[in-house]
Image (cartoon, grey):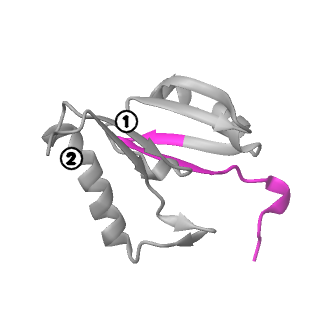
Amino acid sequence: MTTPALQLTDVTFRRDGKQIIDGISLTVHLLETIDGLDRTHPEVASVLVTHHLEELPTGTTHALLIAGGRTVAAGPARDTLTTDAVSAAFDHPVEVAYDRGRWTARAKANPLHTFTP
């Protein structure tokens, strides 16, 4: 068998909002495996499809945001995965953050809907 020139991965840790990989340790293990591919097989290009920024490997260099079958933003990941672009793609206010190789995205808090005990 030959070494592939391209790896296509549609990673889904959730289905219908429910976690489908049982346990955080398995999720972390899968992410670490994907992260390691850049080091162990640098000659293989990789394309990963996800709806969750938390699932992006640390070696992510470029991103393509699609909504309604159209490109919302494309280019280097740090320039593309911005609060404005992700909010536009999901048609909902989302706050995007990047810290030590990991991405997060969460709904922006609405001060009118905060819970006070």
Marks 2/1 in contact by CB < 8 Å: the verdict is: no
Residue 8: image location, x then y, percent: 38, 43
Residue under numbered circle 1: 60
Q: Which residues are magenta?
A: 97-117
Residue at x 72% of width, y 35% of height: 88
Using the image, tell me which numbered label, if any, was put on residue 36: 2
Residue 56 included in the magenta stretch of the image: no
**Mark 2 Cα shell of 10 Å, populated few (<14), some (14-19), many (≥20):** some
CA distance separating discs 2 and 1 = 12 Å
Left or right position of 25 against 82: left
Left or right position of 22 against 113: left
Say what amino acid the circle numbered 2 marks: Gly
Residue 36: image location, x then y, percent: 21, 47
Is residue 113 visible in the rendered structure shown here? Answer: yes
Say what amino acid the circle numbered 1 marks: Thr
43 lies above or below 103: above
